Image (spheres, helix red, strand yellow):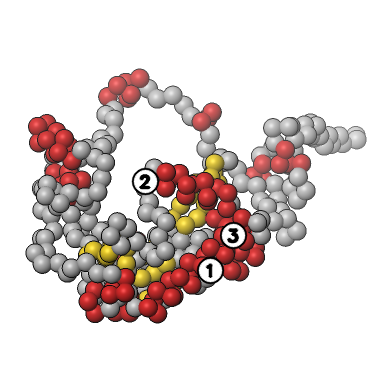
Amino acid sequence: MRRRTAPTPRLKSSPEPSSRAPYLRLPGFAWDPLSRISSQVRRPTLGHAWRYRRQAASLRRLEPELAGILLSEALSVANVPPSTSWAEAPVAVTAPPAPLTTKQLIPQAMVMRLHTFRRKVAECLATARDGRWRVARTQRPEPFYAAGIDCVLPAGRGWAWRFVKEDELWYPLMPSAWPLEPPETDLDIGAIVDYAEKFGFPDAEIVSFMAHGYPGPDLELWAILGAPHVGALKEPAAFDKCAKKDRDRGWVHHGYSLPPIWPMLANPMNIIVLNDKARMTIDKTMQLVDGVPSYNDSIDLES
């Protein structure tokens, strides 16, 4: 009697990849009709620089939560101010130095270095405005650096100074303190302090910072000036537009032949474009000079 064998099973025809999975039509991937799972495809060969990566989750695959859980689950606590104490203002100096002229404050050799740096930055930006940002990148001067003892003459050492155009004199920077010496701000400090006291706002420290001025990191009196980033050279029109906006709104000091604050720490400016909109940024994380920490590295995050 002839023995009958079971027929070999045949696979049903598997559909080709749909338009919703165009990545399966790309070279370097194989369609597996048995599993129909994209994770089973082989990895791209070395000839392909890209690699498709499946999403780990999707909102379409989430299940609705039970109504009882939603009613009993408390919302996250956020934006709750801490309870702090009022921070007193820095102790005022009773006998600050007298105002100085530029010749009395800054050595002539340092003045010439600053003029040279300003001229090189201007030439770099002019080249960028001509559409030659690659050439402008090679024209960027090295960061300007000067130790504190070299920045000023003996009469001005130990202080930071601010130039006043009206009388063309340099005045020592004094710590601000409300209400006698409030910081330069558009805020109505008196109204803010009265409101916080009236309604018992618990974070008294942040209110005191708004009144006296926010404390900054303790920095040595050195001078560091950085040239604009390459992003600003690639987008010179956007750089000029953003700079003009800041000047028109009174947010910056401008029109000085020398830095209006001396010694000065000026980090590089940059332009980034997100969603077709240009934004001016400043990088305070860069270490421009070896051995000199960046501004952000000098901030005490523990206290």
Percent x, y of residue 132: 66, 60
Q: Which residue ends up furthest to the front in the rendered image?
A: 167
What residue type is disc 1 on? Answer: Lys
Alpha carbons under labels 2 and 3: distance apart: 24 Å
Residue at 36% x, 46% y is 250
Density class for disc 2 (Cα within 10 Å; few <14, some 14-19, many ≥20) is few
Residue at 66% x, 56% y is 131
Density class for disc 3 (Cα within 10 Å; few <14, some 14-19, many ≥20) is some
Percent x, y of residue 13: 80, 32
The answer to whether 248 is drawn above or below residue 214 in the figure is above
Which residue was labeled with disc 2? 250
What residue type is disc 3 on? Answer: Ala
In the rendered structure, the answer to whether residue 270 lies left or right of residue 6 reads left
In the rendered structure, the answer to whether residue 225 lies left or right of residue 89 reads right
Density class for disc 1 (Cα within 10 Å; few <14, some 14-19, many ≥20) is some
Secondary element under disc 3, as helix, strand or loop, is: helix
Residue 148 in sight here? no
The quarter of the picture where the N terminus appears is top right
